[in-house]
Structure formats: C-alpha cells, structure tokens
Amino acid sequence: MGTIDRLLLREIVKTLLVIVAILALVLLSNIMVRYLGKAAVGTLSTDILLLVVGFELVKALGLIIPPALFFAVLWVLGRMYRDSEMVALAASGFGYARLFRAVLITAIPLALLVGLLVMELLPWARAGVAELKASQADSADISGVRAGRFNEYSRGGLVVYTERLSEDGSRLDGVFVQDRQQGQLGLVTAEHAYQTTDPETGERYVILTDGQRYEGRPGDLDFTIGSFDEYAIRIPTLETLVYRLPVSAKPWQDLLASDDPRDYAEFQFRLSVPLALLAFAVLAVPLARAPPRSGIYGRLTLAVLLYFTFINLQRVAERWLEDGSVPQWLGMWWLPLLMLAVAGLIMLADSHWWWARRRRWRESRA
C-alpha cells in the first residue's frame, strides 16, 4: 500500500467514523424520544426501556454504515478535487484505477463487517425487540404504572389506576383495579398496593390492602360486595402464549432453507446491504469529481437522489419477491449492478473521449 493509499484510507475512515457517530446519535435520540413517550404513558415498562433502545440501535447499526461510507468517500474526494489536490495526483499518474483501489481497500473489510451485522446481529436484535414487546403486551408489572392514568395490561384483562406512587415506586396509594377472572368482571378499590412473588411457584401477584371488591355483570342487580384487609391478584404470564418469530428476526440459515417467498425476500434484502456498500463505494469515486469552476452541490444532490432511489427500488424489489412477481433467481442482484452501471455512465460523461465525440458530432451537424 502506497503513501497516497494510506492517506486516503486514513481520511475516509476518520470521516466515516464521524458520520456514523452523528447518525447513531440522531437515531438514538429519536428512539429514546419514542420509547420514553411510551414509558411515560405506561405502555412500556421502565425495566425493559434500555434493553429495547439498545436492540433498536443494534438493528440500525448495520444499515447506516453503507450510506455513511458513501458520503464519507464523496466528502474526502470532493474536498481533494476542490483543493486541486486531485489535479496534482493525476499529473503524477494517480488515476481512476488507483482511486478505486484505495477506496475498495476500505470498502471490502467494511462490507464483510456489514454482512456479519445484517446476517447475525440484525435478526438477533429484531427477535429481542419482538420478544420484549410481546412480553410487555401480555404481562403486567406495577413498576410501569403511572399515577393519574389508566394503565392497561394483558389486552384489557387488567386495568390499574392509582392516585400516587411512593418515592421508590414500589407502592401504590389510592388504587382502582379492574380485572377479569374466569369470565367475571371485578372492580377493586384499595388504599395501598404492592407487588410480590411467590417463592414456591415463582408467580407474581399484586397485593391490595384495605379495600373492597365489587363483582358482577353490568346491568344486573346481584352484585357481590366484599371488604378485605389483603387481596391478591395474579399477574398474567406468557405460559399460555404461543410466540411466533417474525420473518425479519429469523436466522439467515432458516431463511435460505425455506421455500416461503417472504423468507427468500428477507434473505435477499440482507444480502443486498453489503453489496450496496461496495457498489456505492465505487459510485462515489466518479460522483466526487468536480469539474473546474464548479461547486459540489450539483453532484451532491445527484448522490442523495441516487441513494434514495436505490432504497425505494430495494423495497420494491423485496415486495416483488414476496409476491412472486419476479423469479427468485433474479433476486436483488440487479440493484448493485444498476448502481455500477450508473457509475460507468458518469465516468463516460466525464471522459475526454465523450467530449471529443460530442464536439465532432456538433461540428458535423454545423
């Protein structure tokens, strides 16, 4: 590896790390705002909040590296063109071939890393998020109860309202509970409530103290009213829940062995991510070239449009594979090849041969 190769490698990696850090911070802030809102209204327990946020960030990590590398190469090479450093390098024989080699030295190891992230860590993180959300939807925990709000659990099977919480959040004061047991609707009011676990069975209970229970059917007059010093309500668990792993969370080995078009489409989507990284790394080299006396904004706008076009085509191709509109052998291979073809067209449009042919054609027309 030559001196210029090491220089480009160092500048691209430094810029890449800055862009990845910025994108990760933006994503982390958006994820935190979204899930903190859910925790504030009691739909997400604070015990699993950080786990869900961590899983969501891991999910996005493998998907933000390809655009980060694309714009890192654009930034580094574009700056060198604007500072006329590329003119000096071209005069010394450092052409497109050397540029492509220097960029691919960075892109190929990153493509392997991204392949590992999307094939292994991405489904693991998606499975973790799906499992946590499923457990949150079908179980209850008073640590997630918010004062002054109706907190719903177990798809409406348990509704809890409390006037206030203790300072450590372990006790509720001024409690109203609606629950269904064996098809019967019950209403309970209590002065206090706390949570405990049966040491023998491991089941969790909400213990209400100093209250009354009303049981009956709305519209009937035969309500049962009882007073109690302590009353226990079992917290529903996931023992009877059949948890199905979503397609996006399946391991790549299962996707590849499956005959379901949706599984094959998901596998092709994951495979297209590292291939897209390589294709856009190559595409960034001709896109970064700035002609004399011109700014970078025209090419930068084209770069953004090309990337968002690729993202949309990626989703369309995945939908086509799921619906069986295209044969499976086609997959998503054509998307990175399309970006490489665009790179070739840009190089052709910038070449002296193209401008010479165009000038001769105009002269012949005149």
Image (cartoon, helix red, strand yellow):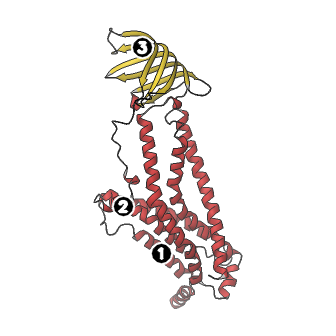
At a point 70% along the width and 79% down the height, the residue shown is 85
Amino acid type at mark 1: Leu
Q: CA distance from mark 2 to mark 3?
A: 53 Å
Instruction: Check the image and report above or below for 54 versus 212.
Output: below
* 330 left or right of 365 in image: left
At a point 63% along the width and 74% down the height, the residue shown is 9
Total numbered circles? 3
SS label for mark 1: helix
Viewport quadrant of the N terminus: bottom right
Amino acid type at mark 3: Arg
Any part of residue 265 in sight: yes
SS label for mark 3: strand
Whether tag 3 and tag 1 are in contact, CB under 8 A, the answer is no
SS label for mark 2: helix
Q: Of residues 70 and 83, which is closer to you in this image?
A: 70
Crowding at dot 3, Cα within 10 Å, few <14 / some 14-19 / many 20+, comes out as: some
Instruction: Check the image and report above or below for 156 versus 211.
Output: below
Crowding at dot 1, Cα within 10 Å, few <14 / some 14-19 / many 20+, comes out as: some
Mark carried by residue 340: 1
Q: Nearer the viewer, mark 2 or mark 1?
A: 2
Q: Quadrant of residue 304?
A: bottom right
Indicate which disc, 2 or 1, sits on the residue closer to the N terminus.
2
At a point 50% along the width and 68% down the height, the residue shown is 111
Q: Of residues 341 and 318, which is closer to you in this image?
A: 318
Whether tag 2 and tag 3 are in contact, CB under 8 A, the answer is no
Q: Position of residue 321 (x, y in %)?
A: 33, 61
Q: Nearer the viewer, mark 3 or mark 1?
A: 3
Mark carried by residue 253: 2
Amino acid type at mark 2: Gln
Q: Of residues 365 and 93, which is closer to you in this image?
A: 93
Question: Residue at label 3?
Answer: 213
